[in-house]
Image (cartoon, grey):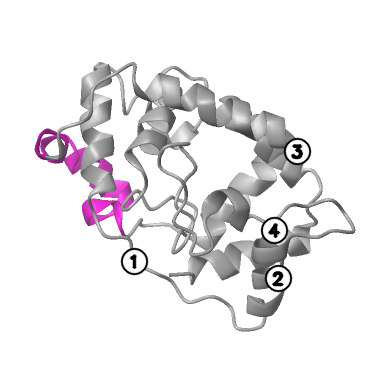
Amino acid sequence: MKKLIAGFVFGVSLTAMAHGAGDPEAGKQNAAACQGCHGEGGAKPIMGAYPKLSGQGERYLYDQLKAIQENARVVPEMAGQLGGKSKQDLQDLAAYFAKQDISVNQADPELVEKGAALYRGGNMASGVPACAGCHNPQGKGNEPAGFPHLGGQNADYLAKQLSEYRGGTRSNGTNAAIMMDVASKLTDAEIKAVASYLSGLN
Protein backbone atom coordinates (compact mmCIF):
# COMPACT_ATOMS: atom_id res chain seq x y z
CA MET A 1 0.00 0.00 0.00
CA LYS A 2 2.82 2.43 0.89
CA LYS A 3 4.52 1.78 -2.48
CA LEU A 4 1.23 2.31 -4.29
CA ILE A 5 0.61 5.63 -2.57
CA ALA A 6 4.20 6.79 -3.10
CA GLY A 7 4.00 5.91 -6.79
CA PHE A 8 0.75 7.78 -7.15
CA VAL A 9 2.08 10.93 -5.47
CA PHE A 10 5.11 10.91 -7.75
CA GLY A 11 2.88 10.42 -10.79
CA VAL A 12 0.53 13.28 -10.03
CA SER A 13 3.48 15.53 -9.24
CA LEU A 14 4.74 14.97 -12.78
CA THR A 15 1.25 15.49 -14.20
CA ALA A 16 0.91 18.74 -12.27
CA MET A 17 3.88 20.12 -14.14
CA ALA A 18 2.39 19.20 -17.50
CA HIS A 19 -0.04 22.13 -17.67
CA GLY A 20 -0.19 25.69 -16.45
CA ALA A 21 -1.98 27.02 -13.41
CA GLY A 22 -5.52 28.27 -13.78
CA ASP A 23 -6.80 31.84 -13.72
CA PRO A 24 -9.52 32.21 -11.02
CA GLU A 25 -10.97 35.33 -12.65
CA ALA A 26 -11.32 33.60 -16.00
CA GLY A 27 -12.83 30.61 -14.22
CA LYS A 28 -15.40 32.81 -12.51
CA GLN A 29 -16.71 33.93 -15.90
CA ASN A 30 -17.37 30.30 -16.85
CA ALA A 31 -18.75 29.18 -13.50
CA ALA A 32 -22.31 30.49 -13.83
CA ALA A 33 -23.66 27.25 -15.29
CA CYS A 34 -21.96 25.20 -12.55
CA GLN A 35 -23.60 27.27 -9.83
CA GLY A 36 -27.06 26.23 -10.97
CA CYS A 37 -26.46 22.86 -9.29
CA HIS A 38 -23.48 23.48 -7.02
CA GLY A 39 -24.55 26.84 -5.61
CA GLU A 40 -22.78 30.19 -5.57
CA GLY A 41 -19.06 29.62 -5.48
CA GLY A 42 -19.74 25.89 -5.50
CA ALA A 43 -20.44 26.04 -1.75
CA LYS A 44 -24.11 25.07 -1.45
CA PRO A 45 -25.31 22.41 -3.90
CA ILE A 46 -29.04 22.12 -4.43
CA MET A 47 -28.94 18.44 -3.46
CA GLY A 48 -26.96 16.59 -0.82
CA ALA A 49 -25.87 14.05 -3.42
CA TYR A 50 -24.07 16.81 -5.35
CA PRO A 51 -20.55 17.77 -4.24
CA LYS A 52 -19.36 21.06 -2.88
CA LEU A 53 -16.68 22.36 -5.23
CA SER A 54 -15.54 25.25 -3.06
CA GLY A 55 -12.25 24.81 -1.27
CA GLN A 56 -11.23 21.73 -3.21
CA GLY A 57 -7.65 21.61 -4.39
CA GLU A 58 -7.05 22.89 -7.90
CA ARG A 59 -5.17 19.72 -8.78
CA TYR A 60 -8.04 17.47 -7.71
CA LEU A 61 -10.74 19.58 -9.36
CA TYR A 62 -8.90 19.75 -12.66
CA ASP A 63 -8.31 16.01 -12.71
CA GLN A 64 -11.99 15.29 -12.04
CA LEU A 65 -13.27 17.82 -14.57
CA LYS A 66 -10.98 16.35 -17.21
CA ALA A 67 -12.03 12.79 -16.35
CA ILE A 68 -15.71 13.73 -16.56
CA GLN A 69 -15.20 15.55 -19.85
CA GLU A 70 -13.44 12.50 -21.32
CA ASN A 71 -16.05 10.09 -19.88
CA ALA A 72 -13.36 8.37 -17.85
CA ARG A 73 -15.51 9.22 -14.82
CA VAL A 74 -19.18 8.85 -15.66
CA VAL A 75 -21.46 11.34 -13.89
CA PRO A 76 -24.87 11.35 -15.64
CA GLU A 77 -25.81 14.75 -14.19
CA MET A 78 -22.71 16.25 -15.85
CA ALA A 79 -23.41 14.87 -19.33
CA GLY A 80 -22.63 17.57 -21.89
CA GLN A 81 -21.82 20.21 -19.28
CA LEU A 82 -18.13 20.37 -20.15
CA GLY A 83 -18.39 19.90 -23.89
CA GLY A 84 -16.28 22.31 -25.91
CA LYS A 85 -14.23 23.49 -22.97
CA SER A 86 -10.46 23.54 -23.39
CA LYS A 87 -8.00 22.18 -20.87
CA GLN A 88 -7.26 25.77 -19.88
CA ASP A 89 -10.97 26.41 -19.34
CA LEU A 90 -11.08 23.43 -16.98
CA GLN A 91 -7.95 24.64 -15.20
CA ASP A 92 -9.49 28.09 -14.79
CA LEU A 93 -12.68 26.61 -13.35
CA ALA A 94 -10.63 24.51 -10.94
CA ALA A 95 -8.64 27.56 -9.86
CA TYR A 96 -11.81 29.58 -9.27
CA PHE A 97 -13.55 26.98 -7.11
CA ALA A 98 -10.33 26.22 -5.23
CA LYS A 99 -10.27 29.84 -4.05
CA GLN A 100 -13.81 29.76 -2.60
CA ASP A 101 -14.54 29.07 1.07
CA ILE A 102 -16.09 25.73 1.93
CA SER A 103 -18.99 25.67 4.36
CA VAL A 104 -19.32 23.03 7.08
CA ASN A 105 -22.43 20.93 7.71
CA GLN A 106 -23.78 19.48 10.95
CA ALA A 107 -22.74 15.88 11.54
CA ASP A 108 -25.17 13.44 13.13
CA PRO A 109 -24.21 13.50 16.84
CA GLU A 110 -24.93 9.77 17.14
CA LEU A 111 -22.37 8.96 14.44
CA VAL A 112 -19.56 11.33 15.39
CA GLU A 113 -17.69 8.98 17.72
CA LYS A 114 -17.74 6.05 15.31
CA GLY A 115 -16.93 8.24 12.30
CA ALA A 116 -14.06 9.99 14.08
CA ALA A 117 -12.53 6.70 15.22
CA LEU A 118 -12.59 5.34 11.67
CA TYR A 119 -11.32 8.53 10.06
CA ARG A 120 -8.47 9.01 12.52
CA GLY A 121 -7.56 5.43 13.37
CA GLY A 122 -9.03 3.19 10.70
CA ASN A 123 -10.17 -0.32 11.52
CA MET A 124 -7.25 -2.62 12.27
CA ALA A 125 -9.47 -5.69 12.41
CA SER A 126 -10.66 -5.31 8.82
CA GLY A 127 -7.52 -3.65 7.44
CA VAL A 128 -9.00 -0.20 6.85
CA PRO A 129 -6.27 2.48 7.11
CA ALA A 130 -6.88 5.84 8.77
CA CYS A 131 -8.43 8.21 6.25
CA ALA A 132 -6.53 11.08 7.88
CA GLY A 133 -3.26 9.61 6.63
CA CYS A 134 -4.00 10.84 3.11
CA HIS A 135 -6.75 13.41 3.65
CA ASN A 136 -5.24 15.34 6.59
CA PRO A 137 -6.43 15.21 10.24
CA GLN A 138 -8.65 18.26 9.58
CA GLY A 139 -9.94 16.81 6.33
CA LYS A 140 -8.11 19.40 4.22
CA GLY A 141 -6.78 16.87 1.73
CA ASN A 142 -3.39 16.95 0.04
CA GLU A 143 -3.16 19.42 -2.85
CA PRO A 144 0.17 18.24 -4.38
CA ALA A 145 -1.03 14.63 -4.42
CA GLY A 146 -4.48 15.56 -5.69
CA PHE A 147 -6.28 14.10 -2.66
CA PRO A 148 -9.57 15.95 -2.10
CA HIS A 149 -10.63 18.17 0.77
CA LEU A 150 -13.26 16.11 2.61
CA GLY A 151 -14.02 18.26 5.66
CA GLY A 152 -17.42 19.94 5.25
CA GLN A 153 -18.36 17.93 2.15
CA ASN A 154 -21.95 16.72 1.86
CA ALA A 155 -22.47 13.42 3.69
CA ASP A 156 -24.76 12.00 1.01
CA TYR A 157 -22.18 12.72 -1.67
CA LEU A 158 -19.34 11.19 0.34
CA ALA A 159 -21.35 8.06 1.08
CA LYS A 160 -22.26 7.72 -2.59
CA GLN A 161 -18.63 8.01 -3.68
CA LEU A 162 -17.40 5.47 -1.13
CA SER A 163 -20.12 3.07 -2.26
CA GLU A 164 -19.13 3.59 -5.89
CA TYR A 165 -15.48 2.92 -5.09
CA ARG A 166 -16.52 -0.19 -3.20
CA GLY A 167 -18.66 -1.40 -6.10
CA GLY A 168 -16.03 -0.53 -8.71
CA THR A 169 -18.21 1.95 -10.59
CA ARG A 170 -15.82 4.79 -9.80
CA SER A 171 -12.49 3.52 -11.01
CA ASN A 172 -10.85 6.34 -12.96
CA GLY A 173 -7.38 7.60 -12.13
CA THR A 174 -4.52 6.09 -10.22
CA ASN A 175 -5.95 7.13 -6.86
CA ALA A 176 -9.00 4.97 -7.56
CA ALA A 177 -6.91 1.86 -6.97
CA ILE A 178 -6.19 3.08 -3.44
CA MET A 179 -9.78 4.06 -2.73
CA MET A 180 -11.29 0.89 -4.19
CA ASP A 181 -9.08 -1.17 -1.93
CA VAL A 182 -10.00 0.88 1.15
CA ALA A 183 -13.72 1.02 0.36
CA SER A 184 -13.90 -2.72 -0.29
CA LYS A 185 -13.30 -3.24 3.45
CA LEU A 186 -15.93 -0.74 4.64
CA THR A 187 -19.39 -1.76 5.84
CA ASP A 188 -22.51 0.28 5.07
CA ALA A 189 -22.57 1.46 8.68
CA GLU A 190 -18.93 2.58 8.52
CA ILE A 191 -19.53 4.48 5.28
CA LYS A 192 -22.52 6.27 6.81
CA ALA A 193 -20.61 7.14 9.98
CA VAL A 194 -17.42 8.45 8.38
CA ALA A 195 -19.39 10.42 5.74
CA SER A 196 -21.47 12.10 8.44
CA TYR A 197 -18.41 12.86 10.57
CA LEU A 198 -16.58 14.40 7.64
CA SER A 199 -19.53 16.62 6.73
CA GLY A 200 -19.08 18.43 10.05
CA LEU A 201 -15.28 18.37 10.16
CA ASN A 202 -13.56 21.74 9.99
Residue 136 x, y percent position in the rendering: 52, 56
Please state which of the two labelled residues, at mark 2 or mark 4, is closer to the viewer.
2
Q: Residue at x 58, y 28 (%)?
A: 8
Label drawn at residue 181: 3
Secondary structure of residue under mark 4: helix
Residue 65 x, y percent position in the rendering: 38, 29
Circle 2 residue: 117
> Up-down: is 78 above or below 139?
above
Residue 168 x, y percent position in the rendering: 71, 32
Amino acid found under the numbered disc labelled 2: Ala
Residue 28 x, y percent position in the rendering: 14, 41
Circle 4 residue: 191
Q: Residue at x 54, y 63 (%)?
A: 137
Figure quadrant of the C terminus: bottom left
Among the two numbered marks 2 and 4 on one chain, the one whose residue lies closer to the N terminus: 2
Q: Is residue 88 left or right of residue 2?
A: left
Secondary structure of residue under mark 1: loop
- What's the magenta region? 25-43
Amino acid found under the numbered disc labelled 3: Asp
Among the two numbered marks 3 and 2 on one chain, the one whose residue lies closer to the N terminus: 2
Amino acid found under the numbered disc labelled 1: Ser
Circle 1 residue: 103
Disc 3 to disc 2, how far (Cα)? 19 Å
How many C-alpha atoms fall within 10 Å of the one at disc 3: few (<14), some, or many (≥20)?
A: some
Please state which of the two labelled residues, at mark 1 or mark 2, is closer to the viewer.
2
Among the two numbered marks 1 and 2 on one chain, the one whose residue lies closer to the N terminus: 1
- Asked if residue 123 lies in the magenta stretch, the reply is no
Q: Residue at x 59, y 45 (%)?
A: 161
Residue reaching furthest to the right: 125
Disc 2 to disc 4, how far (Cα)? 12 Å
Disc 1 to disc 3, how far (Cα)? 29 Å
